[in-house]
């Protein structure tokens, strides 16, 4: 796995062959960050990475200048790898890892974020619940953006906060935000 852009561009991070999580493909990550460059100021936002896996998206965020990153991961091997990468990249002042269940984190967190990225296992039983859980909590700021990575079998297009779908091979990104209220 390599970081595709920003200050750490080209840096290789190797989770090993027995690692269960699949990092978002380089092509999909590069496409996603091309979109984000036009929508967010990386240095000014708070970022939450749910189902962190390898942490690839968070390292890209740090590489692009994000200074406030939280990664949530339940699996102990994945969590350990994320912690190792945070140390290797020397980003412990801006990035923190939380070991725990994402759904419990959503319910218990008292913090709000500008950008939330969720990359659950594509076969997760509760994958369809993720947007609703986030929008019924205070996790996403009012002008924030939620991105859920998923496979082709998942369709969020009827969710009231759904905005658009981007497809990159087998990787799909659904974008969500709150409706703007007219004054």
Image (cartoon, rainbow, N blue to C red):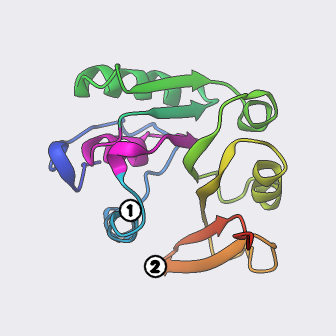
For label 2, the residue is 169
> Magenta stretch: residue 165 in it?
no
Position of 6 compared to 129: left or right?
A: left
**Relative depth, front residue between 19 and 149:** 149
Q: Is residue 38 visible?
A: yes
Mark 2 or mark 1: name the one nearer the start of the chain. 1
**Relative depth, front residue between 38 and 157:** 38
Looking at the rendering, in which quadrant would you find the C terminus?
bottom right
Q: Would you place residue 158 above or below residue 118 in this image?
A: below
Position of 1 compared to 162: left or right?
A: left
In magenta, the rendered stretch is 42-66
Position of 77 compared to 4: left or right?
A: right
> Magenta stretch: residue 53 in it?
yes
For the point 25% across and 44% down, which residue is it?
63
Q: Cβ–Cβ below 8 Å for labels 2 and 1?
A: yes
- Mark 2–mark 1 Cα distance, whole angstroms, equals 9 Å
Q: Which residue is farthest front?
A: 183
Residue 12: assigned label: none
For the point 61% across and 57% down, which residue is it?
143
* Image position, residue 96 (x, y; %): 47, 24
For the point 61% across and 22% down, which residue is it?
99
* Image position, residue 132 (x, y; %): 82, 57
For the point 46% across and 79% down, which residue is it?
169
For label 1, the residue is 25
* Image position, residue 59 (x, y; %): 34, 41
* Image position, residue 182 (x, y; %): 73, 74
């Amino acid at each position: 796995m390599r970081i595709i852009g920003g200050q750490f561009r080209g840096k290789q991070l190797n989770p090993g062959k027995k690692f269960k999580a699949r990092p978002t493909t380089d092509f999909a990550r590069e496409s996603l960050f091309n979109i984000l460059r036009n929508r967010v100021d990386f240095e000014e936002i708070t970022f939450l990475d749910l189902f962190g896996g390898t942490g690839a998206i968070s390292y890209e965020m740090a590489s692009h200048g994000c200074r406030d990153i939280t990664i949530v991961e339940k699996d102990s091997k994945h969590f350990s790898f994320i912690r190792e990468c945070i140390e290797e990249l020397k980003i412990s002042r801006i990035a923190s890892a939380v070991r725990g269940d994402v759904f419990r984190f959503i319910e218990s967190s008292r913090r709000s974020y500008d950008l939330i990225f969720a990359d659950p296992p594509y076969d997760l039983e509760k994958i369809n619940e993720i947007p609703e859980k986030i929008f019924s909590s205070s996790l996403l700021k009012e002008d924030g953006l939620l991105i859920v990575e998923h496979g082709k079998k998942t369709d969020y297009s009827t969710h009231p906060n759904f905005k658009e779908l981007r497809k990159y091979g087998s990787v799909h990104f659904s974008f969500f935000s709150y409706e703007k209220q007219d004054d």
